[in-house]
Each structure stands twice: as C-alpha cells, then as structure tokens.
Image (cartoon, rainbow, N blue to C red):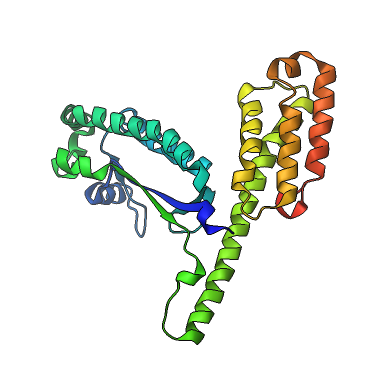
Amino acid sequence: MQHEKYLLVSFRTSKWSARKFDAKATEEVATNHNATGDIGRFNKLLLNKSDINPVNAAFAAARRQHDGLTLPWDDDGDRLLPSARLMDYRAKMQPHLAEVDLRVAHLLSRYQDLIDARRVELNGLFDPADYPSEQQMREKFAHKIEIKPVPASEAIRFGDPNIERDLREQYEEMLKERVEDAQKEVWYRLIDPIKRMVDVLSRDGRVYESTHKAILDIARLVPQYNINGDPKLDKAASDIYALMSKVNVDILRDSEAIRTITAEAAGDILSRMDSKYAGAF
C-alpha cells in the first residue's frame, strides 16, 4: 500500500433522538396489567415524527454519501479515501452538510411551537423537563469531518528495538487485513451493479439510467480505489467500462438483440472475475 495515495476520513455526527424514557408511565402500564418482572420500557416521542424525520433523513443521506465515497477501514469510524478523490469528496459532501444545517435550522425555528403542540398531544405524559433548551438543541445536532494520513509502521517509536519491531510487525499485519477488506469492498461495488444489470437484461426487465451510470462511475474510478494494484481488478473495470460505454439506456430498452449481446458479454466478464473477491462469481 502506498500510504501517500490514501487518507483516513471520519464523519462524526450527533443528533437528538426526540425520545425519552418515562418511568412513571412504564410503572402505570405494569400496574394496570398486573405485570411483574421486566415488561419493557415506555419511551415517549417528544416531537412528531413528521417534524424530526426530515432532519434524520438529511443526516442519513450525508452518511450514505460519505460511505459511498470511502472504503471501510476500522471500527473507530475511520474510512479510506484515495488522496486524488479528496476534492471530489468535499464537493459532494458539502451540499449534504448544508442540507443538514438547513433542516436543523428549520426545526429550531419552530421548536417552541412544536413543544406547545406536543403538550396538547401528550396530555398527561407531557413533561417540560424532557425538552432541552434551544441552545442545548443546537449543540445536540452536530457534524464534523476529520481527515488524516494513513500512518506507516515506520512512525512507531518505542525506544526498545525488539518491542518496536514486534509492534511494527503487528501493525503491518493489521494493515494487510484492512487493505484486504477494503479491496473486497471495491470488488463488490464493481460487481453489484453489473450483476443487477445482467439480471435485468436477462429477464427483459426495465433498465434504469441510474444503474447504467453507477456502472460507468465505479468502473472509471476503480483504478484509484484499487489499493493493491490488482491487475485483475483493473482489467475487469476496463472491460466493463468499454462494454457499457458502447450502449445507452434507450438502446438497451428498445433493441432485444443489443440487450442479449450486452447481457452475455457482461456475464462473461463476471465469470472471469477473481473468486477471492467476487464471492459467488
């Protein structure tokens, strides 16, 4: 792995759940039903779903974009990004983050009115103490992107040469496993849309522009995401791009002959993909 060609990117977020455990209501349910033991928990929805869901949806869309532009790396939230894709990453994340901020601002602008409405709807379950102040709410909704280099084993310094060597060996082994996992993800992203396209073409299903575009996009980007420089992966991406760039959605919809030829050619490419990363293929 050429460390200088990759970055680690984390996208950290925080949100207000708009839910609150109500111990009193839980106890009342147990009493009313003569229940004993662990009966569960009664959680109040402090705002209507129609009010909080747009914010949650914006956060989810930003997360999907982040994950789609990066590769898995560790369990701490870091994901791998080719250095050459940094500007593209920032450009594509910016509108999503702006949408998050816009929807949070819209929610906060109506916050007191929403509380007043919920006061009526919750009736006896309403408790003003459940609601953070507006300033606290602003702090609960947050997002932050952190970018850093991928550390090399040479950066490990301990003072004892023997321990230092062991630590570096352990790090290199961990690095190897993470690279392999990220490489598998690249294979999957290349295979999945092609597999769906072959399935659609083979059963005379409807071909969508989004699927065709997804195939061309990932095939074009594979060389930058090919961490190990696997020639089989580059060849598969090149063959897929060459095949799919010759046809468009209209042709695939209108010509049965072209559909058949394209399906067969794409299926042949799939069958030649390295089974180590291509799963069933």
- As displayed, is residue 169 above or below residue 33? below
The one of 165 and 71 positioned closer to us in this rendering? 165
On screen, residue 205 versus residue 103, left or right, reads right
- Looking at the rendered structure, the number of numbered marks drawn on it comes to 0
Report which quarter residue 143 is drawn in.
Answer: top left
Which residue is located at x 61 percent, y 39 percent? 221
The one of 258 and 31 positioned closer to us in this rendering? 258
The one of 66 and 204 positioned closer to us in this rendering? 66
On screen, residue 21 versus residue 88, left or right, reads left
On the question of residue 109 being in view, the answer is: yes
Measured as percent of width and height from the top left, residue 1 is found at: 59, 59
- As displayed, is residue 16 above or below residue 263? below
Measured as percent of width and height from the top left, residue 236 is found at: 74, 42
Which residue is located at x 67 percent, y 39 percent? 192
On screen, residue 47 versus residue 281, left or right, reads left
- As displayed, is residue 237 above or below residue 10? above
- As displayed, is residue 115 above or below residue 226? above
Measured as percent of width and height from the top left, residue 245 is found at: 71, 26
Measured as percent of width and height from the top left, residue 126 is found at: 18, 38
The one of 57 and 183 positioned closer to us in this rendering? 183
On screen, residue 195 versus residue 159, left or right, reads right
Which residue is located at x 74 percent, y 55 percent? 276
On the question of residue 279 being in view, the answer is: no
Which residue is located at x 82 percent, y 20 percent? 258
Report which quarter residue 119 is drawn in.
Answer: top left
